[in-house]
Amino acid sequence: MGFIFSKSMSENMKNQQEFMLMNARLQLERQLMMQNEMRERQMALQIAWSREFLKYFGTFFGIAAISLTAGAIRRKKPAFLFPIIPLSFIFTYQYDLGYGTLLQRMKGEAENILETEKSKLQLPRGVITFENLEKARREQSKFFIDK
């Protein structure tokens, strides 16, 4: 009789462990999906910001370029054209970020760094562990009573 009861308990325990493993896996998948969704939203917001900035800066750049060119022609001083050079770099960068391939190139470079320059990504004093966090928490806590 005890054997049957023991066998039933071990099956229940095994089923419970499988359920807990499946539940943990499902929770991890949801967390990963949520993190990816947040990352995508942040990237979309960055691209949208860049496009919006480009509208305003493009207008400023166009007016400045026309005004500086007209001033250089009227006064016959080509020095008036020099501010167009740095402004054009800013305009080109923002255009590339908003509508070009800058993000794809940045992603490719990031993948290259992850593959070939792993040592530059290491944290000082190594990876944070639970023990390190717990030790720091105990040192900072004024109310912690160690038993």
Image (cartoon, rainbow, N blue to C red):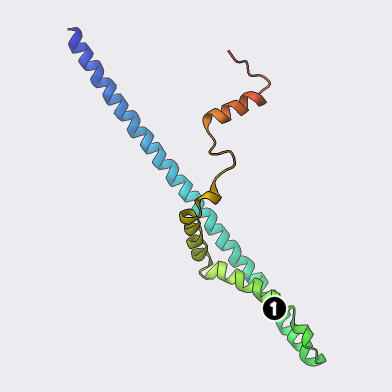
Side of 33 relative to 1 (left or right):
right
- Compared with 140, 116 (above or below) is below
- Compared with 90, 147 (above or below) is above
The residue depicted at 49 percent of the width and 60 percent of the height is 107
Q: Closest to the observer: 115 or 28?
A: 115
Percent of width and height locating residue 19: 31, 29
How many callouts does the rendering have?
Answer: 1
The residue depicted at 56 percent of the width and 70 percent of the height is 96
Side of 73 relative to 19 (left or right):
right
Q: Closest to the observer: 67 or 86?
A: 86
Neighbour tally class for label 1: few under 14, some 14-19, many 20 plus, Cα within 10 Å: few
Side of 122 relative to 70 (left or right):
left
Return the residue at label 1. Answer: 85
Q: Secondary structure at mark 1?
A: helix
- Compared with 45, 99 (above or below) is below
Percent of width and height locating residue 66: 71, 84
Percent of width and height locating residue 8: 22, 16
The residue depicted at 53 percent of the width and 70 percent of the height is 99
Q: Identify residue type, mark 1.
A: Ile
Quarter holding the C terminus? top right
